[in-house]
Image: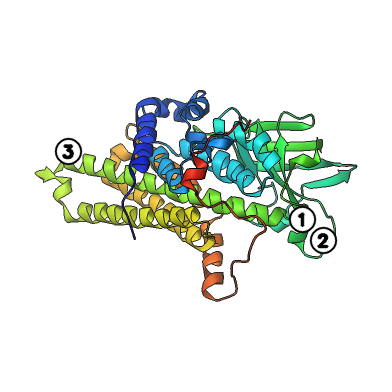
């Protein structure tokens, strides 16, 4: 068992950390206040190869492994959650799902521009009347010759206003034997006729991120846009959630670290009753909890990254990671604000933004309550992993670094 990062992993850490710290940190407060995405953020992440970090070179990626994806998410969210959210939906929900379930032709047509950062992707699952209950989806796609006609609406979609593609799950069988059997997944070109979209404002957190809605009115989809086979939409969606939750958990780990570092700096500099508050035991207890939770969260997401690299299913471990890290990040942000006192209640310091951002991650990508149900299902023996027709490919360093003419 080796807990050492390779030189390539450390290079990834440094590259992403330098980008976030030098290019985003100086302006993030301004865009958070304006509740606007940073316009050059996605193009810059694409140019640096961050948006394709965990895909083979032949598909436009950087040939790095899945742990590298987690390391990148940690560094991004240590500066702001909006950066990591972009990774979660572009890579975790969209591109990684095409990589797992797509045909070779689909990977060359869709994954290559996504991995290169030439196109942006998102996942569109939540609807106005449903969130975690995937089987209750009302969006539907009916057959029309060799095509499908998509109708429906998706809500609370990150990157809705910026993405070129959306992975959309919709009902293709109006009368399935089981609710989940009638779902199918499609990669929808959001520039297609019949697609309308808009932005949502007034969010508590992730204000520098794009969040919106998508409406589909008789959108024609060629059969080649079907990801997986008809009727496999539930499995495709669940595997997308596994990938997305991994990025959320690893990102939340970075937020814990940011809270810890901010608290240590402030506590060392802030005097009270004749000495720095860092010397007060109650403050030390809060900082110790942050330090402990950071180490636990990091080990959890490293484990998931290792399992993914081996090509092993990690639904349970990903659930542990997502639930623990997001709840710990919210608690860390809450205590960091407490340590900062009145200053923490203002946007002069970053911790109030950390607190607002941390709250959302306890809800999206499967709430803490959903994660508890998943974990209890495994513990009670009521849930077990079944083989999928398409598994996420195991990491193969030699093959992933081998160039080809794809795209």
Q: Are marks 1 and 2 in contact (CB under 8 Å)?
A: yes
Q: Position of residue 389 (x, y in %)?
A: 67, 58
Secondary element at image label 3: helix
Q: Earlier in the sequence, mark 1 or mark 2?
A: 2
| Residue in the image at 76% along x and 60% along y | 181
- Which residue is tagged 2? 176
Q: Earlier in the sequence, mark 3 or mark 1?
A: 1
Secondary element at image label 1: loop
Q: Quadrant of the N terminus?
A: bottom left
Secondary element at image label 2: loop
Q: Is residue 390 left or right of residue 291?
A: right
Local crowd size for mark 1, using a 10 Å CA cut-off: few (<14), some (14–19), many (≥20): some
Q: Earlier in the sequence, mark 2 or mark 3?
A: 2
| Residue in the image at 47% along x and 40% along y | 84
- Which residue is tagged 1? 231
Tell which of 263 and 101 is nearer to you: 101
Q: Is residue 153 left or right of residue 89?
A: right
| Residue in the image at 81% along x and 65% along y | 177
Q: Quadrant of the C terminus?
A: top right
Q: Is residue 300 visible?
A: yes
Q: Position of residue 118 (x, y in %)?
A: 59, 27
Q: Are marks 2 and 3 in contact (CB under 8 Å)?
A: no
**Label at residue 269:** 3
Q: Is residue 204 visible?
A: no
């Amino acid at each position: 068992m080796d807990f050492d990062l390779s030189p390539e992993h450390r290079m990834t850490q440094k590259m992403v950390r330098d980008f976030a710290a030098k290019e985003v940190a100086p302006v993030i407060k301004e865009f958070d206040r304006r509740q606007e995405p940073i316009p050059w953020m996605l193009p810059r992440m694409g140019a640096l190869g961050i948006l394709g970090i965990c895909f083979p070179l032949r598909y436009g990626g950087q040939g790095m492994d899945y742990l590298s994806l987690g390391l990148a998410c940690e560094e991004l969210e240590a500066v702001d959650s909006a950066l990591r959210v972009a990774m979660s939906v572009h890579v975790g929900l969209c591109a990684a799902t095409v990589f797992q379930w797509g045909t070779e032709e689909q990977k060359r047509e869709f994954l290559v521009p996504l991995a290169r950062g030439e196109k942006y992707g998102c996942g569109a699952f939540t609807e106005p009347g449903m969130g975690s209950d995937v089987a209750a989806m009302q969006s539907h796609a009916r057959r029309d010759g060799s095509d499908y006609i998509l109708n429906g609406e998706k809500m609370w979609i990150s990157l809705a206003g910026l993405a070129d593609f959306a992975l959309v799950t919709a009902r293709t069988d109006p009368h399935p034997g089981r609710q989940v059997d009638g779902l199918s997944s499609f990669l929808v070109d959001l520039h297609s006729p019949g697609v309308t979209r808009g932005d949502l404002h007034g969010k508590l957190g992730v204000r520098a991120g794009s969040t919106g809605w998508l409406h589909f009115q008789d959108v024609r989809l060629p059969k080649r846009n079907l990801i997986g086979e008809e009727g496999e939409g539930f499995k495709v969606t669940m595997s997308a959630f596994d990938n997305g939750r991994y990025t959320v958990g690893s990102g939340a780990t970075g937020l814990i670290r940011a809270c810890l570092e901010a608290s240590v700096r402030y506590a060392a500099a802030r005097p009270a009753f004749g000495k720095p508050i860092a010397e007060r035991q109650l403050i030390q207890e809060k900082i110790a909890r942050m330090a402990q939770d950071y180490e636990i969260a990091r080990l959890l997401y490293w484990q998931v990254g290792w399992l993914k690299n081996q090509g092993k299913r990690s639904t349970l471990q990903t659930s542990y990671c997502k639930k623990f890290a997001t709840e710990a990040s919210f608690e860390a942000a809450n205590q960091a604000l407490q340590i900062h006192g009145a200053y923490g209640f203002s946007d002069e310091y970053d911790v109030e933004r950390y607190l607002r951002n941390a709250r959302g991650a306890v809800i999206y990508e499967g709430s803490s309550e959903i994660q508890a149900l998943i974990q209890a299902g495994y513990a009670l023996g009521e849930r077990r992993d079944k083989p999928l027709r398409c598994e996420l490919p195991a990491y193969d360093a030699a093959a992933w670094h081998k160039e080809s003419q794809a795209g």
